[in-house]
């Protein structure tokens, strides 16, 4: 569990309140059994037509060459801190339905659902995960021979929360800053766009 717990306006599961995305990672390796369970959680996420359009490429520091290859698929700003994590993964999405070859408009949404399951399982196991959109999809395609109808969409750094002392100052500030979210009234509407639902108003 983290020490940066959210302060929700309404009750939520403790793992949702505890989950956050640190920049500082400890060097401690993640047991293989825990990693299997994280991706097993992703496996059981819902998806349109049960298509399961997600795939993952994983690299751990147990194999330095593979780790460096995956690290090279991140933008430079993310490499600065992600290199300290013991596990990196790329989230790959298949953009067409395998069942009929048509465009799957839900594919990226479904990858997100899989990631949500993975994050919940990670938090339950005392792990932290930092998701990144800052990747180099073309580099990933070159390195891993990703098929034409699939694309690297996100990256994940997985491990244990570490000491912020080794981070650049701007990232230290982010790790120390309190967690904030928009209130429900700004995104839960009724009647028309922008009109807050009565559900979004505190009693």
Image (cartoon, rainbow, N blue to C red):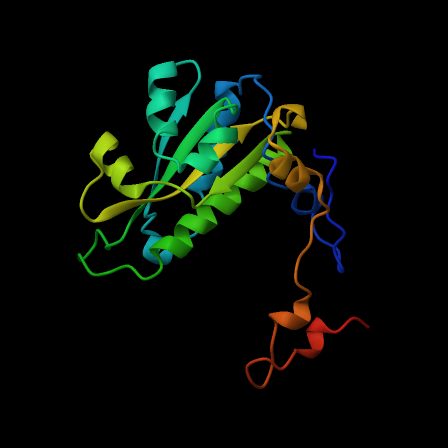
Residue 143 is left or right of residue 23, and the answer is left
Give the tally of numbered discs.
0
Give the percent coordinates (x, y) of residue 104: 28, 59
Residue 185 is left or right of residue 71, and the answer is right
Give the percent coordinates (x, y) of residue 108: 37, 54
- Report whether residue 193 is seen: yes
Q: Residue furthest bottom?
A: 191
- Report whether residue 163 is seen: no
- Look at the picture and state if 85 lies above or below 186: above
Q: Residue furthest right?
A: 203
Seen at 71% across and 39% down, the residue is 176
- Look at the picture and state if 29 lies above or below 77: above
Q: Quick one: quadrant of the N terminus?
A: top right
Give the percent coordinates (x, y) of residue 78: 47, 36
- In which quarter of the view is residue 134 placed? top left
Seen at 17% across and 56% down, the residue is 101
Give the percent coordinates (x, y) of residue 168: 60, 31
In front: 122, or 2?
2
Q: Quick one: quadrant of the C terminus?
A: bottom right
In front: 146, or 43?
146
- In which quarter of the view is residue 171 placed? top right
Seen at 70% across and 78% down, the residue is 198
């Amino acid at each position: 569990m983290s020490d940066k717990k959210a302060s929700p306006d309404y009750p939520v599961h403790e793992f949702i309140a505890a989950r956050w995305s640190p920049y500082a990672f400890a060097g401690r390796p993640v047991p293989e059994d825990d990693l299997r369970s994280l991706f097993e959680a992703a496996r059981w996420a819902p998806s349109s037509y049960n298509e399961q359009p997600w795939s993952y490429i994983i690299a751990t520091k147990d194999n330095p060459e593979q780790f460096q290859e995956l690290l090279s698929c991140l933008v430079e700003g993310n490499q600065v801190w992600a290199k300290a994590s013991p596990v990196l993964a790329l989230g790959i999405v298949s953009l067409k339905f395998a069942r009929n070859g048509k465009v799957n408009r839900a594919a990226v949404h479904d990858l997100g659902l899989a990631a949500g399951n993975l994050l919940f399982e990670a938090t339950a196991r005392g792990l932290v995960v930092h998701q990144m959109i800052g990747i180099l999809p073309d580099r990933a395609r070159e390195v891993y021979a990703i098929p034409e109808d699939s694309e690297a969409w996100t990256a994940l750094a997985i491990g244990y929360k570490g000491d912020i002392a080794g981070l650049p100052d701007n990232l230290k500030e982010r790790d120390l800053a309190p967690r904030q979210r928009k209130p429900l009234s700004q995104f839960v509407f009724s009647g028309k766009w922008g009109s807050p639902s009565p559900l979004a108003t505190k009693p």
